[in-house]
Image (tube, rainbow, N blue to C red):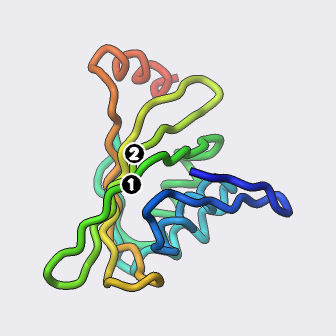
């Protein structure tokens, strides 16, 4: 992963990922530009987030991120890409999420609409890659 500062916005590169929607997802999320993040999804896009019900639609995704994701910084490290028979891409990204209180390893699975660099995001599944003990420690932060 490479990050460069430019006019208060980051330019992100994840080895092996050329899908602009995924790069912009991480950049806009880290800039807390959740309007842009949500607009990268198709109109009925889906976000499967930890500790949450399924979030469907750009407006619902934007509202969820504005409520739950402020102050989080996503640090993608590695990616694997699989092309499905119908032309969709499944991109698995591993990295971590940092907040002022904790850092946790995370996996993101993106399903993109088609095999193009401009493909839109159909869905993102976010999985915490932590032990049960680590997750129990994090659950106290959500209740506060």
Left or right of 20, for residue 83:
left
Q: What number is the disc on residue 21?
A: none
Left or right of 117, for residue 66:
right
In this orientation, which residue lies closer to the viewer: 63 or 75?
A: 75
- Residue 28, x across and y down, in percent: 62, 62
Query: What's the CA distance linking mark 2 and mark 1?
Result: 6 Å
Q: Which residue is outermost to the front?
A: 16
**Count of numbered badges drawn on the protein:** 2
Residue at the disc numbered 2: 94
Q: Is residue 63 above or below residue 141?
A: below
Left or right of 91, for residue 16:
right
N-term mark: 2 or 1: 1
Q: What number is the disc on residue 79?
A: 1
Q: Is residue 27 visible?
A: yes
Q: Is residue 51 visible?
A: no
Q: Secondary structure at mark 1?
A: strand
Q: Is residue 102 above or below residue 118?
A: above
- Residue 144, x across and y down, in percent: 53, 23
- Residue 5, x across and y down, in percent: 79, 55
Residue found 51% across the figure and 57% down from its top: 14
Circles 2 and 1: CB atoms closer than 8 Å: yes
- Crowd tier of the residue under label 2, counting other residues whose Cα lies within 10 Å: few below 14, some 14–19, many 20 or above: some
């Amino acid at each position: 992963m490479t990050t460069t500062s430019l006019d208060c916005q980051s330019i992100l590169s994840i080895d092996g990922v050329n899908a602009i929607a995924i790069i912009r997802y991480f950049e806009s999320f880290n800039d807390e530009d959740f309007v842009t993040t949500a607009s990268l999804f198709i109109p009925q896009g889906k976000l499967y987030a930890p500790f949450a019900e399924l979030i469907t639609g750009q407006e619902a995704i934007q509202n969820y991120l504005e409520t739950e994701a402020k102050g989080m910084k996503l640090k993608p490290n590695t990616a694997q890409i699989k092309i499905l028979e119908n032309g969709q891409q499944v991109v698995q990204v591993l990295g971590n999420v940092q907040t002022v209180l904790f850092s946790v390893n995370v996996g993101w699975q993106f399903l993109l609409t088609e095999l193009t660099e401009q493909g839109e995001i159909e869905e993102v599944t976010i999985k915490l890659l932590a032990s049960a003990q680590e997750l129990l420690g994090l659950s106290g932060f959500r209740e506060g």
